[in-house]
Image (cartoon, grey):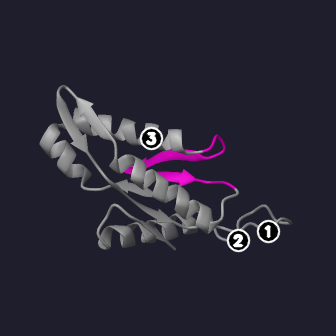
């Protein structure tokens, strides 16, 4: 799960059109960094959920760190205005048993774990990854 740090400041300082541009850029950056099998979706406001099938915790953390770094080094531009943002990410994993394709924990439980990790990242300074 990822959240754009201090997103309200972007909307308040540069307007909602710039906020929309930042959201588009985050989605584009993520799509460029992820595999074809990965899924990204906007979860609400400035939050996104990224699903990484067949990915262990260490690999998921490495991907999250790569996303964090890529966003930090990208500038959004609109109407001669520039905005640079960072993201915080929370990582949670689910191990599926080969005999039972259904998750031992519900998807909502996994998202809840990722959300808790996300808030740990925010509480520890933002622009970072925390793993459940």
Among the two numbered marks 1 and 2 on one chain, the one whose residue lies closer to the N terminus:
1
The residue depicted at 34 percent of the width and 42 percent of the height is 74
Q: Looking at the image, is 67 positioned above or below residue 61?
A: above
Q: CB atoms at circles 1 and 2 under 8 Å apart?
A: yes
Res. 125 image quadrant: bottom left
**Residue at left 37%, top 55%?**
3
Residue that mark 3 sits on:
29
User: In the figure, 93 relative to 70: above or below?
Assistant: below
Local crowd size for mark 3, using a 10 Å CA cut-off: few (<14), some (14–19), many (≥20): some
Rendered position, 51 above or below 25 = below
Give the label on residue 22, or none.
Answer: none
Residue to which mark 1 is pinned: 97
Q: Can residue 8 be seen by looking at this rendering?
A: yes
Relative depth, front residue between 87 and 49? 87
Q: Which residues are magenta?
A: 35-53
- In the current view of this chain or complex, which residue is farthest to the top? 79
| 69 sits left or right of 97 in the view | left
Image spot of residue 27 (x, y percent): 44, 40
Decide which of 37, 82 is in the foreground and name it: 82
Indicate the secondary structure of the residue bearing disc 3.
helix
Quick check: is 37 in the magenta stretch? yes
Q: Nearer the viewer, residue 79 or 1?
A: 79
- x and y, in percent, of residue 121 in the image: 37, 69
Between the C-alphas of marks 3 and 2, the distance is 31 Å
Residue pointed to by mark 2 = 104
Is residue 130 toward the left or the right of residue 85 in the image? right
Task: Judge from the rendering whether residue 127 lies leftward or rightward of residue 98; answer left or right.
Answer: left
In which quadrant of the rendered view does residue 96 lie?
A: bottom right
Q: CA distance from mark 1 to mark 3?
A: 32 Å
């Amino acid at each position: 799960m990822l959240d754009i740090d201090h997103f309200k400041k972007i909307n308040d300082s540069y307007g909602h059109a710039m906020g929309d541009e930042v959201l588009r850029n985050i989605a584009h950056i993520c799509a460029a960094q992820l595999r074809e099998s990965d899924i990204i979706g906007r979860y609400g406001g400035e939050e996104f959920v990224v699903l990484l099938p067949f990915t262990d915790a260490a690999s998921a953390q490495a991907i999250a760190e790569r996303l964090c770094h890529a966003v930090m080094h990208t500038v959004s531009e609109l109407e001669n205005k520039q905005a640079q943002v960072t993201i915080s990410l929370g990582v949670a994993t689910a191990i599926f048993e080969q005999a039972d394709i259904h998750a031992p924990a519900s998807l909502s439980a996994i998202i809840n774990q990722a959300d808790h990790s996300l808030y740990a990242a925010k509480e520890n300074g933002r622009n970072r990854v925390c793993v459940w």
